[in-house]
Image (cartoon, grey):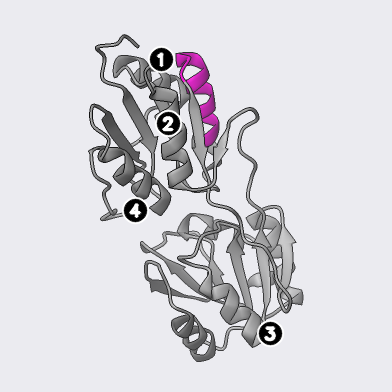
Amino acid sequence: MTATTTPHVLILGGTAEARRLAELLHATPDLTLTSSLAGRVAGPRLPPGEVRIGGFGGAEGLAAWLREHRVDVLVDATHPFAVTIGLHAARAAATARIPLLALRRPGWTPVEGDDWHEAGSLEEAATLLPALGRRVFLTTGRLGLPAFAALNHLDDMWFLVRSVDAPEPPHPPRMEVLLDRGPFTLDGERELLRRHRIDVMVTKDSGGAATAPKLTAAREAGLPVVMVRRPPVPEGVPVAADPETAAGWIGELLRPA
């Protein structure tokens, strides 16, 4: 990067943290900012700055885009469970020889009164359900439903599925879909569990405040929660826990010598 080149930051986004980081960087003078969204959610909340929607064509396609658009810093601010794009980002940044930062909100931590049952995958979570309950509040997103449709021993269970967009098959045979987008309130989550007579919850360790009230409501009601552990960030990639820290890291990196 020469002294006359405007630094270019690409944010792989789709999360609230990505939007907040874009807001912080958008206020920075002499900075080119692009946010990339996967396009899996209809009507996404768009961040400020330039926005592109759609995939890159794997790690090689992303590396080519980084070089073509002279990106100086890549930020992976996707969902903590977006494993594939995280791996692609690491490979692409290494190929293009540019810095990569992962922006990951901290995961949740159980407190006194929680009845958590950890699972390493959605498939493992599905195997734990029969011993825990029959009316399931499933908050793992519409793309994870096939894991709960493939096991015969779940046929007699009922699922309340909450997602932003309507899910497509395969999915559990006995299912009600609730289309909604966080943040959610504690009173709302309490009423949802009561109204649907939920006796077990399944969620991913996504972290963040927007969907945390469901965990408080489950704890108050004495419900077991199957918690799917989040995957690790690719080895060697630095991590920022919040947008402000990420913005500071980028600012220091791009500060003129």
Q: Which numbered tag is attached to residue 222?
A: 3
User: Which amino acid type is shown beneath numbered disc 2?
Assistant: Ile
Q: Is residue 60 left or right of residue 39?
A: right
Q: Is residue 236 above or below residue 82?
A: above
Mark 3 near mark 1, Cβ–Cβ under 8 Å? no
Q: What is the spatial separation of the Cα atoms under label 1 and label 4, in whole angstroms?
A: 41 Å
| Alpha carbon separation for disc pair 4 and 3 | 33 Å
Query: Looking at the image, is mark 1 or mark 2 nearer the viewer?
Result: 1
Secondary structure, mark 2, is helix
**Residue 69: percent from left, percent from top:** 29, 19
Q: Earlier in the sequence, mark 1 or mark 4?
A: 4
Disc on the earlier residue, 3 or 1: 3
Mark 1 residue element: loop
Mark 1 / mark 2, whichever is N-terminal: 2
The span shown in magenta is: 86-98
Give the quarter of the figure containing the C terminus.
top left
Say whether disc 2 or disc 4 marks the residue closer to the N-terminus.
4
Q: Secondary structure at mark 3?
A: loop
- With respect to residue 237, does 139 lie above or below? below
Q: Are marks 1 and 4 in contact (CB under 8 Å)?
A: no
Say what amino acid the circle numbered 4 marks: Val
**Horizontal and vertical percent position of residue 19:** 34, 48
* Magenta segment includes 124: no
Distance from Cα at disc 1 to Cα at disc 2: 14 Å
Residue receiving disc 2 = 250
Q: Which mark is residue 41?
A: 4
